[in-house]
Amino acid sequence: MEEHLLVCHMSGSPDGDGWVRGSDAFGGGEDQGEEVRTSMTQRKKPNEPSKGNIELAKRYEEAWRRINSALEHDYHFEAIAIEESILSNRITSFLHGVGAVREDEIRQPKKYLLFNTLIERWTEQCKKKGHWDNPADLIDSVDKWRQRRNSAIHALTESFPGEPPLVSLGDFLEEAKRTAKEGAKLARQVDKWHRCQLAAKKKAKKVPPPRKNP
């Protein structure tokens, strides 16, 4: 199966010709105040970030600013929601790049795959032979975090009719805090793994194929 590189926006839709590097700082690139013109004679320079990459870098910068602010001010549910967005985006970007997610499954608007589905496909893809590291422990940690995320987001006011919640509000908020902090850690780890796979892919492309015997 041919493996393609891609750019994947925060919403999860592919657009461009290279893997987005998430929270990396994109050096160089077009002047953001200048109108971008495309023609057959005007081509993007090698290694020059696309407009989509530049815009996504801004989104990631804002996302991490909000996560850090939310953690600082105890807005743990906002942090968890943004962390899931980052995790889903990084996993989707990788999966689309190796052909495990079709464009029609994620092209916005109103197209997305469930977080659980992404994790399942990530697991399956990394078991295959190729250029990719198999981060089994990381995948397992993300999947366990997904379950904790579900509890944090959906169980705030959950209880059996007529009965008090099984977990006290204080304990529940403490668990949400731990989930938010763990989500930030995992988002950074997955982003780092994603960038390592991009580097491995580029390195593999530079290795000349074995010479055939005449």
Image: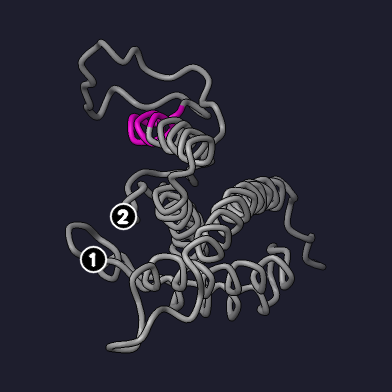
For disc 1, the marked residue is 111
Indicate which disc, 2 or 1, sits on the residue closer to the N terminus: 2
- Rendered location of residue 187, percent (x, y): 57, 51
- Residue closest to the far left: 109
Magenta segment boundaries in residue numbering: 49-58
Residue kind at label 2, given as amino acid type: Ser
Q: Amino acid at mark 1?
A: Lys
56 in magenta = yes
Residue at the (51%, 70%) spot, across then down: 146
Q: Which residue is mark 2?
A: 13
Residue 140 spot, x, y in % from top left: 66, 74
Residue located farthest toward the right when viewing the structure as drawn: 213
In the image, what residue occupies the spot 57% across and 68% down? 145
Which residue is painted at 56% across and 72% down in the image? Answer: 122
In the displayed structure, 90 sits above or below 41; it is below
Q: Is residue 71 above or below residue 180?
A: above
